[in-house]
Image (cartoon, rainbow, N blue to C red):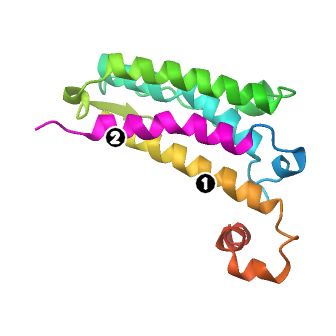
Amino acid sequence: MTDPFLAETIALLERTPRVVRELLYGLPDPWLDTPDTSDGWTPRDVVGHLISAELDDWIPRAEMILEQGTDRPFEPFDRFQHVERDKGVPLAELIIRFDQLRGESLARLRELVGEDDLDRVGRHPELGEVTMRQLLATWAVHDLDHVAQIYAALAGSYDGAVGPWKAYLGILVRRDQA
């Protein structure tokens, strides 16, 4: 029996750049300037972070699992490197860059990882032993988490404008609970 996990995961990962592009490309700045929580990220920050993960997280870690196993831990991932790196870069350029990098990452994933590799083990510097399957599942859920973060930031742009209806809008209520 063939394990559908890899194909199902790739199916989701392929969609994230399109979702981000359709959601953010060309939106007026007032929609884009609000973070998801009071000390959170704006949609621009999220796209920058996703770019960082394409460059330094998912594929490098998959390669380490295949090449090093548990002999060497993954390199630490700087979740905030986008802050300085992307200063002054227009959001439209970041969206295009993310789309390009994701395409390259998925092409590399397809050539690198097969069904027989999903239970291979690597070592995370904080979490310890992790499997390829766990890494790829985390990649997919990481995308979902950050797409949700973008939606929360966009909703936050209208936090005050909705008036008393805020009590019925979970996306805004959750922002206050964060």
Q: Determine whether, in the image, residue 135 is placed left or right of residue 154.
A: left
SS for callout 2 = helix
Which quadrant is home to the N terminus?
Answer: top left
Instruction: Check the image and report above or below for 42 versus 111.
Output: below
Residue type beneath disc 1: Ala
Which quadrant is home to the C terminus?
Answer: bottom right
Q: Evaluate whether residue 130 shows in this view.
A: no
Of 84 and 45, the residue lying toward us: 45
Does 120 lie within the magenta span?
A: no
Q: Is most of the magenta stretch helix, strand or loop?
A: helix
Q: Residue at x 28, y 40 (%)?
A: 5
Instruction: Check the image and report above or below for 165 versus 159.
Output: below
Of 44 and 72, the residue lying toward us: 44
Does 10 lie within the magenta span?
A: yes
SS for callout 1 = helix
Residue 120 image-quadrant placement:
top left
Q: Determine whether, in the image, residue 151 is placed left or right of residue 160.
A: left
Q: Residue at x 15, y 36 (%)?
A: 2
Residue 17 image-quadrant placement:
top right
Question: Which span of residues is magenta-colored?
Answer: 1-24
